[in-house]
Amino acid sequence: MTRFLRTVVAAAFCLAIPQMASAIGQAGYVETATRPGSFPLVQAGVAAPLLIDPADWAGVRRAARDLQADVNRVTGLTPALVTTWNTAPRVTWSSSAPSAGAR
């Protein structure tokens, strides 16, 4: 094999491995069908608000803003970042409640 061909094959391998490795052994979190226990981030043109504790760590607040931006990039809708609790479905971000999830 020529040096150029070896370089091309090595580059292709290096580019392909992260995409293949990221799916190994990880649970899927994105679904296209509703099922018991799941909740939509966006449904019928409405984005679920993201509940955040304004006193939480800066990294937690940034993660919520990053999720807000990701939802906007994918759907064109921007979920509200809220700091008060009510009965609407939401995604919670808190370092003190790591498994809070949707409420």
Image (tube, rainbow, N blue to C red):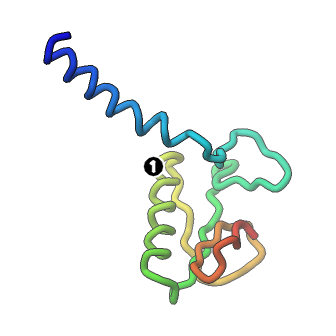
Which image quarter holds the N terminus? top left
Name the residue furthest left. Answer: 3
Which image quarter holds the C terminus? bottom right
What residue do we see at 43% from left, 80% from top? 58
Name the residue furthest top. Answer: 1
Would you place residue 78 above or below residue 29 in this image? below
What residue do we see at 78% from left, 75% from top? 87
Name the residue furthest bottom. Answer: 55
Would you place residue 40 above or below residue 59 in this image? above
Query: At numbered mark 1, what does the secondary structure look like: helix, strand or loop?
Result: helix
What residue do we see at 45% from left, 58% from top? 69
Q: Is residue 25 left or right of residue 100?
A: left
Q: Position of residue 20 (x, y in %)?
A: 48, 34
Q: Nearer the viewer, residue 58 or 77?
A: 58
Q: Position of residue 26 (x, y in %)?
A: 61, 46
Per the image, the residue denoted by label 1 is 73
Q: Nearer the viewer, residue 7 or 42?
A: 7
Q: Position of residue 6 (x, y in %)?
A: 21, 19
Would you place residue 33 above or below residue 94 in this image? above
Q: Is residue 80 left or right of residue 38?
A: left
Circle 1 Cα neighbour tier, 10 Å, few/some/many (<14 / 14–19 / ≥20): few
Name the residue furthest front. Answer: 1
Q: Nearer the viewer, residue 17 or 38?
A: 17
Q: Position of residue 21 (x, y in %)?
A: 48, 39
Question: Callout 1, which amino acid?
Answer: Arg
What residue do we see at 59% from left, 73% from top? 93
Residue 91, by quadrant, is: bottom right
Q: Nearer the viewer, residue 64 or 20?
A: 20
Residue 30, by quadrant, is: top right
Q: Is residue 50 left or right of residue 31?
A: left
